[in-house]
Amino acid sequence: MTTPSTRAAPMELESIHADCNSKDAGSLLRTGAKRIRGGGGVYNPYTAKKKTKPSSSGGSGSNPYSNPNKTSQGASGGGDHEEDLIDDYYHEEHEHEHEHEHEDALPEDEPHEPMEPNPAEDGPTTAALPFFSDVTEATFQRWQRPPNDCRDNSRDLSLQWLDMDMIGGTALRENPSELEPGRRVVGAAEGQVPIIRAFGVTEAGNSATVFVHGFTPYGYFALPQGSSFDHTEENLARIRLYLNSRLEGQARGGKLHEYCFAVSYETGYKSIMGYESPHTHFFRVVVAMPTLIPTLKRIMEDGVDLPGVETPEGNEYSAFECNVPFVLRYMIDHEISGAGWITLPKKTYQLRDPSRRKTNSQVEVDITYRDIISRKPEGEWNKIAPLRTLSFDIECQGRKGYFPEAEKDPVIQIANAVTVYGEKTPMVQNVFTLKGCLPIVGAQVISSDNEVDMLMKWRAFLEACDPDVITGYNVQNFDIPYLLDRAETLGKGKYGNQTIKGFAQWGRILNSKAKMKETTFQSAAYGKRNNIETTIEGRVIFDMLPYMQRNHKLSSYSLNSVCAEFLGQQKEDVHHSIISDLQNGSDEDRHRLAVYCLKDAVLPQRLMDKLSVMVNYVEMARVTGVPMSFLISRGQQIKVLSMILRKCRNEKLLVPTLKKGGFNPDDANYEGATVLDPIKNYYQVPIATLDFASLYPSIMQAYNLCYSTLIGPKEVHRYDPEIYKKSANGHVFVHSTVKKGILPTILSELLAARKRAKKDMKNAPTEFERAVQNGRQLALKISANSVYGFTGATVGQLPCVPIASSTTSYGRELLEKTKEYVEKNYTVANGYKHDAQVVYGDTDSVMVKFGTKTVEETFPLAIEAAEKCSKIFPSPILLEFEKVYFPYLLMNKKRYAGLMYTRPDKYDKMDQKGLETVRRDNCALVRDVIQTSLDKILIEQDVEGAIGYVKKQISDLLQNKMDISRLVITKSLNKGAEYALGIGGKKEDYKVKQAHVELAARMKKRDAGSAPQMGDRVPYVIITGAKGASTYERGEDPIYVLENGLAIDCKWYLSNQLSKPLTRIFEPIIEDVTKSLLQGEHTRKIFIPTPAARKGSLMMFAVKTAKCIGCKAPVNSKNGYLCKHCSPRQAEIYLEKLECLRVAEKSYDELWSTAQKIHNSFHSDIMCTGDGCACQFYRRKKVQADIRLAQEVLDKFGR
């Protein structure tokens, strides 16, 4: 395949299946290569032994990647200034996250030879080109970044940083700044010190790593009440020596030159907690390493007799700001925004020469923390650098009956798409394949004869393209750990291939491996999930699957379903059980697999672009002031804590570090958001919706709710009632005129900034600038709404129930005031045509019936009511008119539907809340019936038509006329299913038997190769069974049902799937739903199936009687197919049956054509297995069965 030197045209998925006659790529790698040269580094095979965690897969069929129990990867690193990556010891207690990490000791630096040409100047070189025998030099260069334009420190160096971390290293001997008198070193002069690494990209697109020196960790400790203190310099020195001794005795890890660097006495600070905090005197203690802070906190909190301090009320010191991650501490103190731009002024930094380089970044520099200039994300510094994103996907060849396991099953393909931010098409698209593969239009195919060669070529490609962000779909839990574990397997035991030893060096730090750890995340919103979290130093891993799960409520999170929802396109969903057959086939078969794999690599990037994921995360990092990695791996709390800490620093307020167990759970028993009781009805008149703009943030501003404005119940008597306001639940906060709180200040700034961003978005001259401003205003909105949740998180960084409960109590008060005002003022007595009525209120919305007949009449009344109500509330609380529903079906609290109008001439959409149209534990029949009923009720306003439609559907269901695809239910095999499947797990995890789990166990016994695996979604239908059989016993595979003629339990679907949703919808419309819809003439004609001859049943002993093909009457002849009455009509009956076959074949052709269009596959088979796909998979299977039966009937005429 010829590869042009210019950028290849983008791969169009519509044309990707086009015939290609160019020559196959062939074998690319010279086997036996010992190292890859490029990007400023040399592969050195690891010699350190690695700890291996025994597999707990529990037997065949288990999938360690969807429910991980992994071997962690070691790390190699160290050197002149850097010795080892220090794990962030901070964790967020509120997340209920428990991590189990297994990491190896880091070996000493291994020698590596200098690279020529200088990688500091040119970045990755073409020295790796011989590794690819059929890749042109132009192609290899096209993978790489632009040439490095930073040759010395004579110019300012600006970059957008994406990630920061910290390592332990030795202190600098000389300040990098040429402007520092005497080149004095900032910070510690010797011993191990923390060094911050900032990874980023320059405006020219060069990758950069900045080593920041001199910043040290510290914490504050409040002196006990009534303490007297000798605060002379001599005594502070004695305290430092004392704490140094205590830390040396209790600290874990390697020995340090010094433990406690400095102690200072601070009197200008106050605690944020309380209007008048008792804490006003503090020690600021600076230590050598961040890992010493928890030890120091424990020493001080447990009680300590410090020299020169007398503490009559006890010697326990309260800790403040001791839980701030070190990197975040640096960012806050020096006003560095997340994912923002920083400038290194000329002459203040030092470019590292090749002998001292520790990274393969194009630019690598040292600088002290004081010399960096932080740029506010405004004006020219609001831009985003040309960041590189690699989206990839792998395919594995599993054994029959087993889900792929890295210890046994090879990786056979890796597809990649590299995109530069600001460009609409990928700069690179390629597929690395094991064995030959036909060329692919718009993409490069790079084939290998063996797996090690393929993996190492991909590793070289990764380093050459040097991505800032790595993405894909479920890459954290499958693709990445599988690749790393597979390479580890190939490098030991019977494989023992030394070439693969450096494969795991994916990051920007030389000789440092990607590291994996297991995490368990549990929350009320997402439940409990086991994950694998991988760290690739210098690169951000952004998995699109957890992003979609966190941010979008969908009926299915398969890549197929997500792309159908957001991109309007689908792909073939190839099941892992058929991948081996394709791999073992011809070059053409592997081409089909490569097209599938490439599409799986391209689609996550398209999703990122469509949903503006990258720009939204960059702007969220900038607004909240945290690294992007915090947004991905941590919860909501760290974002709000960062904003609070930044504001408190300016106000000289300190944030306390709560002790574990210091929060009283009983304090959390406060009433949440208010919902006004709904007046259930089918409203065929307009219903106006009045919404409070940013309700909870507005309440916190209006009533000055903050830690710093709260007066405790024991202190209230000391203050004049004129300076405070008491909320409905009795909590007291001072007015903003007395003291404006930190939280209200943060909120007012966030919301003001959002207004500016929305204005800038309207005036933005380009699409990308509009996207940036839109991402910013969304980040500001989300951040403002997160503040209330931060105060109400009972297991969080800084919970404060008085703030949270007061916020909700004021919310209830506002809803009730709005209802009272509207119903009191909008009356006939006041000159209006009708008396207004509030029919429902939900947290921040009020639904009002003004009695008008048209939407046009309703708009001015709703706008007027919103304006008048706003005037009775304190600023900035604002009630806005947002929309009108007409008609409006109100079923219950948080369950309603209506046609939504935001302008009077035409409705925007049908708005639904709390209905069964998207739930996956309902079959498609329920979703179809509910949606069609709503369409008829709301859009057509034809209630009788809706009732007639429902009756027809129920009648068809009971008469077995329903297509089986509409009855399929899908559920996922999660934890608990392991026990039932015999692959591990605990009995107590599977207390209640479930239909899909029991079915999976039966399918495994029938054919382990095609049976569902852990993590798969299992489609099933409920069939009839023996009398008294439980539902979990009657779940069956839809294909098995079609192939064996099993009968569907139609009554079960009516009573367990349709009954409740229909009752909810029609209850406000008709008096007796049960009698009108679920009983009656349409339910009396029921299909009663003939029992199947199953093993152990009486039907096994029944003798089948031959029946006439024409009239179904019994025939005596064993070979007879027509009775004596139908024999004269033989030709006529034959033609009738022939027509049945033709109709079935025509139907199948139409279904097949539809499937080809959906999958853009016009020249090959459809490999889709049907889950979550719109290609009518089960209908095709049903028609195939009909064709088979029709052919069997026709065959009888030929006997």
Image (cartoon, rainbow, N blue to C red):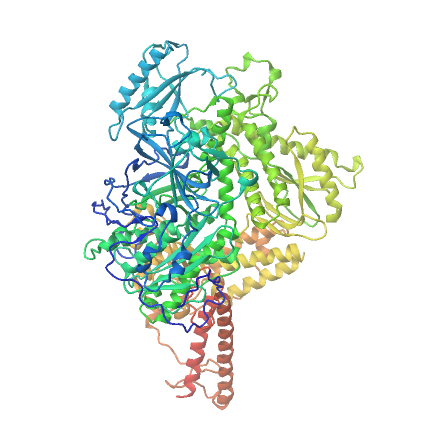
Rendered residue at 68%/45% (across/down):
687
Q: Is residue 947 left or right of residue 532?
A: right
**Residue farthest toward the bottom in the current orientation of the protein:** 1128
As rendered, which of 541 and 665 lies closer to the eye? Answer: 541
* Quadrant into which the C terminus falls: bottom left
Rendered residue at 34%/11% (across/down):
235
Asked if residue 366 is positioned above or below residue 721 in the image, the reply reads: below
Q: Is residue 1026 visible?
A: no
State which quadrant residue 746 falls in.
top right
State which quadrant residue 435 falls in.
bottom left
Q: Is residue 488 visible?
A: yes
The location of residue 1089, given as percent across then percent down, is 44, 68
Query: How many numbered dots are placed on residues in this image?
Result: 0
As rendered, which of 561 and 523 lies closer to the eye? Answer: 561
Q: Is residue 180 left or right of residue 1131?
A: left
The location of residue 80, given as percent across then percent down, is 28, 36
**Residue farthest toward the right in the current orientation of the protein:** 831
The location of residue 310, given as percent across then percent down, is 35, 9
Q: Is residue 46 left or right of residue 1003?
A: left
* Quadrant into which the N terminus falls: bottom left
The location of residue 63, given as percent across then percent down, is 32, 54
